[in-house]
Image (spheres, rainbow, N blue to C red):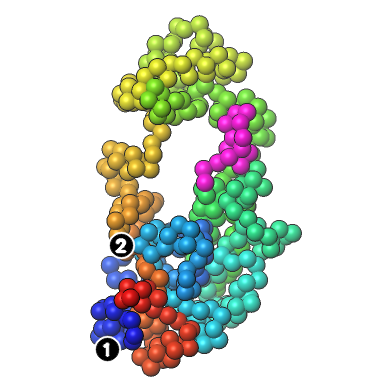
Amino acid sequence: MPGHSDAAQQGELRGERHNTPLRTAHSGPLNGVKVIEFAGIGPGPFCGMLLADMGAEVTLLERAGGTFASQLFGGGRKAVANRGKKSLCIDLKNPAVQPLIQQMIREADVLIEGFRPGVMERLGFGPEICLALNPRLIYGRMTGWGQTGPLAPRAGHDANYAALAGMLDSGRRHGGAPWAPPTLVGDMGGGGLLLAWGIACALCEAQKSGQGQVIDAAMSEGAALLGHGLFNLEALGEWQGQCAIDSSAPFYDVYACADGLWLSVCPLEPQFYASFLARLQLQSDPDFQGAQYDSRRWPAMKARLTRLFASQPRAHWEALFADSDDCVWPVLTMAEARQHPQHLARAAFVELAGVPQPAPAPRLSRTPGQALEAPPLLGEHTTERLRAIGLNDAEIERLLALGAVSLAADKARSE
């Protein structure tokens, strides 16, 4: 094939490999589970990554040119969310791919899509059609607002979903502007992680019933679910007033050090708080006399701690609290986090294709997750995946000629 320079894939076309499994070395708990992921942005790819980390065969259906996310954040080997997946570059709107995708659906256990409601139906791969093809299919749908309701067709991003869930407001420092860590609350935690949880539940149920089902995962609802504890505090009348964990309290906040670096200070429990004061030699200080949770005293206490922590560099405070349970820890950058002794001891970060990234989690004792394969280049496994579902050379050549599939990654490497 013109431009198809990958020796391994050329070998497949000569018949040296045929219908080979995507994964031979992974023994994770989802080993043998076949997933089709329609390429998208944010939470859908994260969900697929979680499944791939745990051993699932994830075939990523990507279009030529990639997605907005790949253009904005970089694709190929740097697309961490695509690790462990196989990239099939395909034109979903080309009529010639309908039988191909239908065959993949018949063989799949899970389908992941993150389009707006109605898009998959227009493409001809809505839940009714797919479940008719494969009644045991778990059909995972990832949207911002869900498949129904007045906002269902509307666009949004992480901060929007967190905002309407009441969670963005909870991310404010006391008296400051609402905000929260980027993409964590809506996209990843409330979105991709909750979709993966739904898929895991549905897979368990399908083992008993033999039936698949549709998962309607909404990032706004997932964001609210992550904040269940805050709704608990609100019910008690303790949220957004003088709350111990909303940055109002002096013993649950971040403080700047003399070198401009930061500490997280969180001795909430009385025994930790008493030890914290003793270590700072503040147990007899007038500003810290009285009950720990007397919020009337908090402003003066916080002002005092602000001045104290600003008097020494972060390393000084790290050394002071190093052997304690006082819940004082440095605010690390991502680069610093990768080098922390705790994370090094547990190999909490890995490197694939020169890109540092978090290791699979959580840890399973018998069938742990593994990050075995770097993220694929766009279309890197097009030939492999087509042959894996039984297409021969002539059929692959026909799809290429029709523009239904492409070997974009290989062409780019050969030019």
Q: Main secondary structure of the magenta part?
A: loop
Residue 364 position, x and y percent, is 35, 54
Q: Quadrant of the N terminus?
A: bottom left
For the record, the magenta segment spans: 168-182
Quarter of the figure with residue 381: bottom left
Residue type, numbered disc 2: Leu
Q: Residue at x 40, y 70 (%)?
A: 378
The residue that mark 2 highlights is 372
- Name the residue at the right extreme: 150
> Crowding at label 2, few (<14), some or many (≥20) Cα neighbours within 10 Å?
some
Is residue 172 in the magenta section?
yes
| Residue 58 percent across, percent down from the top left | 42, 69
> Is 7 drawn above or below residue 283 in the view shown?
below
Q: Which residue is mark 1?
A: 14
Residue occupying image coordinates x 55% and y 14%:
300
For the C terminus, the image quarter is bottom left
